[in-house]
Image: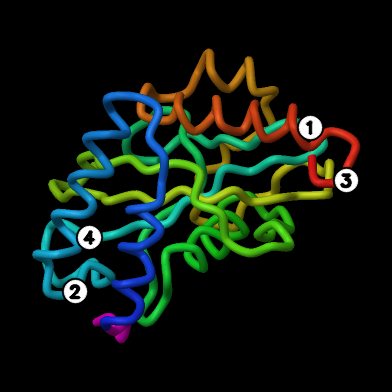
Amino acid sequence: MSTAGPQAVAAVRQAVQEFVTTSPREVESRWRLLVELDELPDPFDRYAGPVHLTGSGLVVGPRGTVLLVHRKLGIWLQPGGHLDAGELPADAAVRETIEETGLPVHHPPEGAHLVHVDVHPAADDHLHLDLRYLLLCKSDADPVPAEGESQQVRWFTIDEALEVADAGLVDGLERLRSFVSSNRGNGQA
């Protein structure tokens, strides 16, 4: 059971409202997220119903970005997953990314930055309202996922990631490319 209150829902709603979409899929996902945030009694609680928020990380590091093969779906995706009780999506993105990659990731110095939204069916008959955050990693070490997590996880260049990633991730990867291009030389990329 989630302990996230109305202020947390309002903060997520504001971030989604301010999110600038670049594709029809993002437009649809943003719209669906806003509708569900207004209708769900507790969008943070994965056990409250089949529709709920998730938090994911789009990692930028010295070797590119990190993707993993989803254990149930068998496709290359970003790290991320369900929220723990009382956890916000941005915090879940960091926790899940560390668990699934073993890499020391963090939000940018200015705070959590929503870089992608996607609404998609999950492997076990529920719907994820996925908020995807930019996460930075200074390490160039190989990923070392925790036991029980997908062991198929590795660094990709953005171009390589675009070749293998699920279609729902393409817009987010293109944003990573823009971020890397605009931040070269300032120590963030």
Identify the disc placed on residue 42.
2
Give the residue pinned by disc 4. Answer: 52
**Label 2–label 4 contact, CB within 8 A:** no
Q: Nearer the viewer, mark 1 or mark 3?
A: 3
Which percent across, then down, holds residue 152? 56, 35
**In the rendered structure, which disc, 4 or 1, sits on the residue that comes first in sequence?**
4
Residue shown at the point (56%, 54%) measured from the top left: 113
Residue range (magenta): 1-5
Q: Which residue is mark 3?
A: 187
Cα distance between the residues tagged 3 and 2: 39 Å
The amino acid type found where label 3 is placed reads: Gly
Tell me if 98 is positioned left or right of 50 in this view: right
Q: Please give the label number shown on residue 63.
A: 1
Q: Position of residue 14 (x, y in %)?
A: 36, 62
Kindly indicate the quadrant of the structure image that contains residue 51.
bottom left
User: Could you give the CA–CA distance between mark 4 and mark 1, rounded to whole angstroms?
Assistant: 32 Å
Residue type indicated by callout 4: His
In the picture, the disc for residue 35 is: none
Residue 188 counted in the magenta span? no
At mark 1, the secondary structure is loop
Q: x, y percentage for residue 178?
A: 64, 28
Q: CA distance from mark 1 to mark 2?
A: 38 Å
The alpha-carbon separation of the residues under discs 4 and 3 comes to 35 Å
Three-letter code for the amino acid on which mark 2 is drawn: Asp
